[in-house]
Image: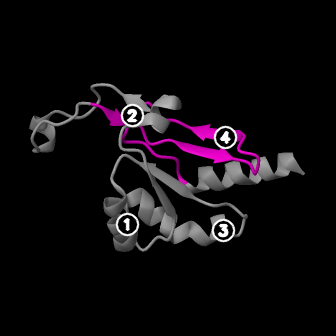
Amino acid sequence: MAELGELRDNYQAILDRGVEVVAVSVDPPETSARLRERVGLDIRFLSDPEGSLMDAVSLRHRGGAPPPAVTGKPAGNPDIFLPATFLLDGDGVIRWVYRPDTYRVRATIPEVLAAIDAAQAGAS
């Protein structure tokens, strides 16, 4: 939620650079739609319920979910997907990747903007 709020607050700076933001989640489309409305962020969410796309880019952390004693929730799927950020150019070529080793860390907006600026400078 904090990441989406930061993204919302800085979204115009990303749009001004001609970049589209797309989020990929294992959540069903209805859940993502509610989240998009609650946060007030008009980005496209793609649903990947089986984690196929995220597996293709090695984001599944098998057994990485915190245990029920930590979360206070019943045991579910022990796998989690790491929050990664990819910057693709207009041809779909990956130009930058931020992939942490833990689900607790996200790319910051300044890091994302710097990556966009560097990719655009390299393309010109």
- Residue 52, numbered circle: none
Instruction: Compute the Cα span from label 4 to label 1.
Output: 27 Å
According to the picture, the residue beneath numbered tag 3 turns out to be 15
- The colour mode here is one colour
- Residue 102, numbered circle: 2
Instruction: Name the N-terminal-most of marks 1 and 2.
Output: 1
Classify the position of the N terminus by image quarter.
Answer: bottom left
Instruction: Compute the Cα span from label 4 to label 3.
Output: 18 Å
Asked if residue 99 is positioned above or below residue 15 in the image, the reply reads above
Q: Position of residue 41 (x, y in %)?
A: 46, 70
Asked if residue 60 is positioned above or below residue 72 in the image, the reply reads above
Question: Which secondary structure lies at badge 2?
Answer: loop
Q: Nearer the viewer, mark 1 or mark 3?
A: 1
Q: Which residues are magenta?
A: 79-108
Instruction: Name the N-terminal-most of marks 3 and 2.
Output: 3
Which of the 4 quarters of the picture holds residue 101?
top left
On whether residue 95 falls in the magenta region, the answer is: yes
- Residue 96, numbered circle: 4
Task: State if disc 2 and disc 1 touch (CB < 8 Å).
Answer: no
Question: Which secondary structure lies at badge 1?
Answer: helix
How would you rate the neighbour count of disc 1 (Cα within 10 Å): few for under 14, some for 14-19, many for 20 or more? some
